[in-house]
Amino acid sequence: MVNFLLSQSQQAIATTDAPAVPRKSPGIVPNHSRFGCYEEFLQAYLRQGYQFCFFEELQEPKKQIALRHDIDFDTNFALKSAIIESQLGIKATYFFLLRSSLYNIFSPQDYENVQLIREMGHAISIHFDPSIYEDFHKGLQQEVALFRDMFKAEVSIISLHRPDPFFQEYDAPIYGIEHTYQSKYFRDIKYVSDSTGVWRFGHPFDTPEFAQQKSMHLLIHPIWWMLDGSTNLEKLRVYYDLRVDALKADFSHNCIPFRKLNGHI
């Protein structure tokens, strides 16, 4: 499990230098929820003959997977999933919120995480919340300018944060930039998501598309795979406790009087 009190560089070094997990060849486990070992989950796709690609490379009707990560909670989990993918030779696209109350990609630690993920060969982009803007085209224009300036990265596709029915049906680019809910990524191809910590459209291994090796758009939220717990609520309780501990540590680091209170809160 990620230690929130380590710096991101320490976490990356510790994880990267650790011995590689032996690559077993398990069958698909019978538990229908199947939120288990993330590495084994990905290996099942590789054994099925799939290749992981970026969205702009998603052109074949079979054997391609566009692996997408919407980072809603924490970049630590994103870093951990990126390391696992890199060890398997898999590439993914990571979408980060620029305006979030849960993390800040411009803070030193989160910024380092995003950079490390990109250095592994993954793509990085914007997880965009159109609901906070009166003019969502102008809002995206502002976020793209910030993202490009901070990370020196072009933005060719975005994902939408908790899109309402209007945006789930919005098939045009936004500010000239494609998004993951356009028909060619959301309706014309098999879409599978673990949103809210459950398989909302059925487990991918149970689909006829998986059996037939048809190409897929796969949305994975790392938080559901990187925490202990048998349910989404158990994992959220673990995450909440970790965030409380991390907040206390940050307060103690930045506020001397708080150090006297820390043990009593």
Image: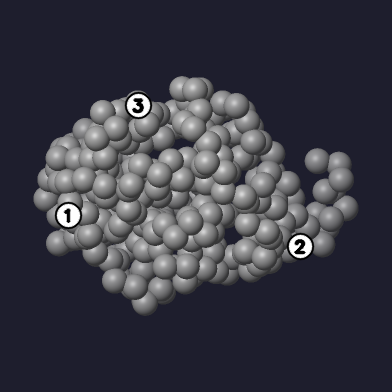
Residue type at tag 1: Gln
Which badge, 2 or 3, is on the more N-terminal residue? Answer: 3
Q: On residue 91, which mark appears?
A: none
- Front residue of this view, candidates 208 and 5: 208
Tags 2 and 1 in contact by the CB under 8 Å rule? Answer: no
Q: Position of residue 156 (x, y in %)?
A: 24, 64
At label 3, counting other C-alpha atoms closer than 10 Å, the crowd grade (few under 14, some 14-19, many 20 or more) is few
Q: Residues within 10 Å of mark 2 (few under 14, many from 20)?
A: few
Dot 1: element: loop
Q: Residues within 10 Å of mark 1 (few under 14, many from 20)?
A: few
Instruction: Please name the residue that numbered disc 3 is placed on.
Output: 206
Q: Is residue 218 above or below residue 105?
A: above
The answer to whether residue 253 is seen in the rendering is: yes
Q: Is residue 144 left or right of residue 45?
A: left
Tag 3: residue type?
Asp
Secondary structure, mark 2, is helix
Q: Do the residues bearing badges 2 and 3 touch, measured as CB atoms within 8 Å?
A: no
Please give the name of the residue rendered at 47% of the width and 40% of the height, measured from the top-left corner. 41
